[in-house]
Amino acid sequence: MESTINIYDIYKTMSDNKIILIYQGLFDQVMIKSVIAMTEKKLIQENIEEGLRRKLFNVMVEGLQNICKHQVVAGENLQNPFLMIGKEDSSYNVVTGNFIRNEKIQVVKEKIDFINTLNKEELKEHYKTARLNSVISDVGGAGLGFIDMVRKSGNKLEYKFYESGVHFSFFILHSKISNN
Amino acid sequence: MQTLNIIATEDTPEIKFNGETNEFMISGRSLPEDVTTFYKPVFEWLEVFSTLEAPGTVFKFKLEYFNTASSKIILDILMKLEDIMESRQSELKIEWYYFESDDDMLEAGEEYKELVEIPFHLIAC
């Protein structure tokens, strides 16, 4: 049975946030470029300090490109991915959601859970090792996105999988970027 | 040495080899959808470069941003340069530019510098 993930529910969990941007729709490189351009302008308008802007940008690009590479697109019943950026006190929340195949869930969970156990130094070493050993995949990824998101944001990644039938789940990823 | 001149776009860097000054520069932003295809000309150029008795060449990186896939490709480029330098025993050097306020770009440069045995200069701009 198809369940529709209610983006509004997720939006409500960000009710303490000032929403900077919400996009739900097709995710491809062309769209990414537009969203990036729009977000950059907004971040400057919001007078966000340069270092924080840069970290936000980094996390957003990795998150968006992850979606492009790993999303499930086939099937008209699957709703489109989304991106949400909100401000909460002096931090920023970047939330993405997209359908993925259930076979991928375990790998993603293990990756993120592991990365979340590492301290700053360990993250640096893990990134260096992973990068040395990585090979560009057939979708053009290097498998380093999550590590980079944690390094740049300064916080653990939070995630949730919402089962949606036998084959797919909706994957929500939340990165909080703090001003360190 | 053949020229290489790739114009920058919103998601890909400018890549330019200047035969007169012997400078090879990658500048701008790197977040292409397909890093392998985009950087292929660079690796092809490096293959030719590796066979030539070229005088000292400076490889300049002046990047404002690069995604993680580009980070891997940059490492591959640096390692190729290291091979070239070792086998030819000729002078190569790397100049890694970063905006003064960009700690991340400086840190990235420092990390690359630790990984390769090539004269590697970190330059604030």
Image: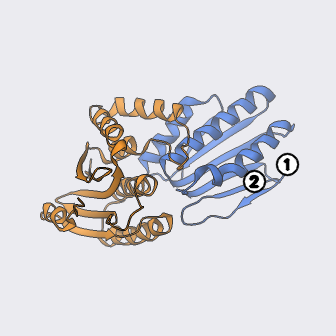
Chain colours: A orange, B blue
Mark 1 and mark 2 in contact? Answer it, CB < 8 Å: yes
Q: Within the image, what quadrant is residue A50 found in?
A: bottom left
Closer to the chain start, of discs 1 and 2, is 1
Q: Which residue is mark 1?
A: B1
Q: Which residue is mark 2?
A: B17
- Is disc 2 on the same chain as disc 1? yes
Q: Residues within 10 Å of mark 2 (few under 14, many from 20)?
A: many
What subunit carries mark 2? Answer: B
In three-dimensional space, the C-alpha distance between marks 1 and 2, rounded to whole angstroms, equals 9 Å
Where is residue B9? Give x, y as percent.
Answer: 59, 66
Disc 1 on helix, strand or loop? loop
The residue depicted at 37 percent of the width and 57 percent of the height is A60
Q: How many marks?
A: 2
Q: Residues within 10 Å of mark 1 (few under 14, many from 20)?
A: few
Q: Is residue B52 toward the left or the right of residue B111 in the image?
A: right
> Residue A118 versus residue B63: which sits nearer the camera?
A118
Question: Which amino acid type corresponds to the residue marked 2 in the rendered image?
Answer: Phe
The image shows residue B23, relative to residue B55, as above or below, that is below
The image shows residue B66, relative to residue B112, as above or below, that is below
Where is residue A138? Give x, y as percent.
Answer: 55, 46
> Residue B24 versus residue A113: which sits nearer the camera?
A113
What subunit carries mark 1? Answer: B
